[in-house]
Image: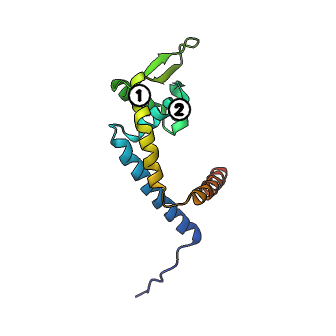
Amino acid sequence: MSEQIEQQPTNELQLFVVLSRASQWVTAHVHQDIRKYGLNPTEFAVLELLYHKGEQPLQQIGEKILMTSGNITYVIDKLAGKGLAQRKACPTDRRVIFAEITTAGTSLLDSIFPLHKEAIAKAVGGLTEEERAQAIQLLKKLGIAAQSSFT
């Protein structure tokens, strides 16, 4: 009978596990907050993009929030059904369709975005302001390195 030797996780493995768990819990806080407003995380991401950046071509929304274009069409349909966003034809290129936030969508985000920021603050509240600044720098560095080495 062979005895299994318990090995200490490598530093890289430990970082991956800790980073993944932290991300899951922070994301859980944020998603729980978003659902309180009758939106799913994807709908909120699109609505928040339109709120902060103005009208966007449908083709570019997916790139900005990391979604496929087929899903964007579905999400815009759902937001339009709720009266929060609408489609708008491009006046110079009929192949391009824009999504824009409606007055109702703007009113909704005006009222919930401050509360959403508080939920995010609570989710990342385990770190001091200085530690958050350090984490931002380190995670950007990690992301850039991982992206550049991706094959």
In the rendered image, the quadrant that contains the N terminus is bottom left
Please name the amino acid that badge 1 sits on. Ser
What residue is at 36 percent from the left and 29 percent from the top?
Answer: 78
The mark total stands at 2
Between 58 and 68, which is closer to the camera in this rendering?
58
What residue is at 54 percent from the left and 19 percent from the top?
Answer: 96
Between 131 and 39, which is closer to the camera in this rendering?
131
Residue pointed to by mark 2: 52
Please name the amino acid that badge 2 sits on. His
Q: Nearer the viewer, mark 1 or mark 2?
A: 1
Q: Which mark is residue 82?
A: none
Q: Residues within 10 Å of mark 1 (few under 14, many from 20)?
A: few
Q: Residue 134 appears at what percent x and percent y?
A: 62, 58
What residue is at 59 percent from the left and 12 percent from the top?
Answer: 92
Image check: 144 left or right of 119? right
Q: Residues within 10 Å of mark 2 (few under 14, many from 20)?
A: few
Q: Residue 9 appears at what percent x and percent y?
A: 53, 74
* Image vertical order of residue 23 relative to residue 54, above or below: below
Please, what secondary structure does the residue beneath circle 1 have?
helix
Give the spatial CA distance, label 1 vs label 2: 13 Å
* Image vertical order of residue 77 relative to residue 7, above or below: above
Q: Residue 137 appears at what percent x and percent y?
A: 64, 55
* Image vertical order of residue 71 relative to residue 18, above or below: above
Residue pointed to by mark 1: 107
- Is the Cβ of the residue at disc 1 closer than 8 Å to that at disc 2? no
Please, what secondary structure does the residue beneath circle 2 have?
helix
